[in-house]
Image (cartoon, grey):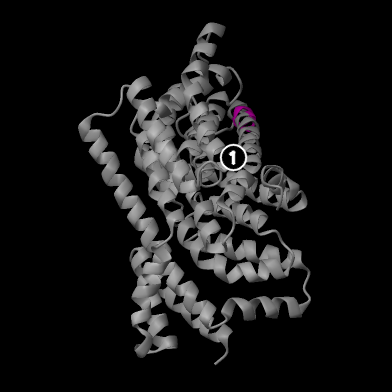
């Protein structure tokens, strides 16, 4: 039996378990156990425990629960409201400005948390009711929040980029640097689409035969004086300083990603305690429990995905797949298109964490053999994973929005979020044509690609 056939068998086992509806971590665990027994033999089953331990015995993984804690601390405070109000003060009189301010607030919040669901939930709780009061349709409102929340896995610190860096044995600092420019560009692209969608919606509402959109009423722009705008900006200045402090100690080589995450947690706790009235005891316990649950889920997925990756590597599946592709003499961009389509399909059913940990060891030898930069590829994969967060049936951000806005039909949320999938596809195309948009900053900061 060829290695590729053995790899296909493992894939089929995993997909059957995923589609059964059981938690992803357990499906991966069962797949890993069956793979070890099937291809390594019962005599080697003790290796399973060793592989699980070795996959988690990595200091770099400590950054994950720390960054998750940092995000949950912000989500439990008044931070999200402060960010949204600052964006509203500066953009409320622009067509679609309130939705744009939601995206901008999401981008800043994403830089503080690294979590897309946390970003969508924290900003959405504040922004969706505000936009409903100001006459925004539910499509514009929920679509902007769902899409803005996806920035959490791209703008550093990003759990997805951390896991890719560990799986691909690439510099997490370079990956973080590579995500900054795309994060800014995609934020701007989201705002441009919001402006276009708002204009189209306005024209549609003026047609005599137009049907009313869900949640639309007369729009009333709130007026802010210039002093009020600058005061709102001053309130969010500590957030910017916090992001700068965490990234500074990381990029200057003062601290590892895990140490930088620890610095971030300490600064967040100090900032919330001093400037944002802190968290009550009950809220703090809730934050700690949520952090424990989320971190445990991520690390379980990481551990069992790593076991599967070790088995695949032992069977030489990645190496033989890379050799097969290079021998086919197919244009490397055709291969990249196929990879992105496969990742998009996987994103319809699986969370980004599990996809990144599973596919990176398999795809990386092929990517390097085709001459692609692994830092560039890591960011492209992450942008692709953003699509999965806003596409059914498992689009996590869609269900987060449904949870915080139960009065809005899921169909309306889906219609509002779908155009942003196209925006992200355009972003992938853009950074494929101009890869320097990703690689320039890592090369500037680290002197290499």
Compared with 231, 423 (above or below) is: below
Compared with 21, 396 (above or below) is: above
Magenta range: 199-204
Q: Residue at x 59, y 66 (%)?
A: 342
Which SS type dominates the magenta stretch? helix
Q: Residue at x 50, y 14 (%)?
A: 222
Give the farthest residue toward the left. Answer: 282
* Callout 1 secondary element: loop
Compared with 285, 49 (above or below) is: below
Q: Nearer the viewer, residue 139 or 349?
A: 349
Residue 371 in view in this figure: yes
Question: What residue does disc 1 label?
Answer: 252
Rendered image quadrant of residue 196: top right
Quarter of the figure with the N terminus = bottom right
Residue 212 in view in this figure: no
Instruction: Give left or right: position of 283 versus 316.
Output: left
Rendered image quadrant of residue 28: bottom left
Marker count (numbered):
1
Rendered image quadrant of residue 297: bottom left
What percent of the width, then of the height, locates residue 37?
A: 38, 85
Q: Nearer the viewer, residue 161 or 431?
A: 161
What percent of the width, then of the height, locates residue 40?
A: 43, 87
Q: Residue 203 lies in magenta, yes or no?
A: yes
What percent of the width, then of the height, locates residue 392?
A: 48, 55
């Amino acid at each position: 039996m060829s290695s590729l056939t053995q790899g296909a068998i493992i894939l089929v086992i995993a997909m059957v378990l995923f589609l059964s509806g059981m938690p992803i971590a357990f499906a991966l665990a069962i797949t890993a156990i069956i793979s070890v027994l099937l291809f390594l033999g019962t005599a080697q089953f003790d290796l399973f425990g060793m592989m699980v331990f070795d996959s988690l015995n990595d200091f770099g993984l400590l950054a994950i629960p720390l960054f998750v804690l940092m995000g949950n601390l912000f989500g439990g405070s008044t931070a999200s409201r402060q960010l949204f109000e600052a964006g509203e003060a500066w953009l409320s009189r622009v067509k679609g400005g309130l939705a744009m301010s939601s995206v901008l607030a999401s981008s800043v919040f994403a830089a503080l948390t690294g979590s897309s669901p946390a970003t969508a939930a924290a900003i959405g709780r504040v922004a969706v009711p505000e936009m409903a009061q100001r006459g925004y349709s539910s499509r514009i409102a929920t679509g902007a929040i769902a899409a803005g929340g996806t920035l959490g896995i791209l703008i550093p610190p990003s759990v997805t980029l951390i896991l890719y860096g560990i799986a691909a044995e690439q510099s997490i600092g370079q990956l973080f640097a590579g995500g900054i420019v795309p994060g800014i560009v995609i934020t701007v692209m989201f705002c441009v689409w919001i402006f276009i969608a708002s204009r189209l919606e306005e024209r549609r509402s003026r047609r005599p035969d137009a049907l009313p959109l869900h949640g639309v009423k007369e729009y009333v722009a709130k007026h802010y004086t210039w002093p009020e705008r600058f005061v709102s900006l001053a309130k969010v200045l500590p957030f910017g300083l916090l992001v700068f402090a965490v990234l500074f100690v990381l990029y200057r080589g003062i601290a590892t990603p895990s140490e930088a995450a620890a610095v971030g947690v300490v600064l967040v706790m100090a900032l919330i305690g001093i400037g944002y009235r802190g968290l009550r005891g009950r809220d703090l316990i809730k934050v700690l429990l949520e952090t424990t649950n989320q971190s445990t889920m991520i690390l379980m997925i990481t551990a069992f995905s790593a076991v599967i990756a070790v088995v695949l590597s032992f069977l030489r599946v990645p190496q033989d797949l890379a050799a097969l592709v290079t021998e086919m003499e197919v244009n490397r961009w055709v291969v990249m298109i196929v990879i992105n389509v496969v990742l998009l399909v996987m994103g319809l059913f699986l969370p980004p964490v599990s996809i990144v940990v599973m596919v990176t060891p398999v795809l990386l030898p092929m990517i390097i053999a085709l001459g692609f930069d692994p830092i560039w590829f890591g960011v492209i994969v992450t942008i692709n994973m953003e699509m999965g967060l806003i596409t059914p049936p498992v689009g996590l951000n869609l269900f987060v929005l449904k949870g915080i806005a139960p009065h809005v039909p899921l169909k309306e949320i889906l219609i509002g979020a779908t155009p942003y999938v196209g925006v992200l596809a355009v972003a992938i195309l853009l950074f494929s044509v101009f890869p320097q948009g990703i690689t320039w900053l890592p090369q500037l900061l680290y002197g290499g690609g």
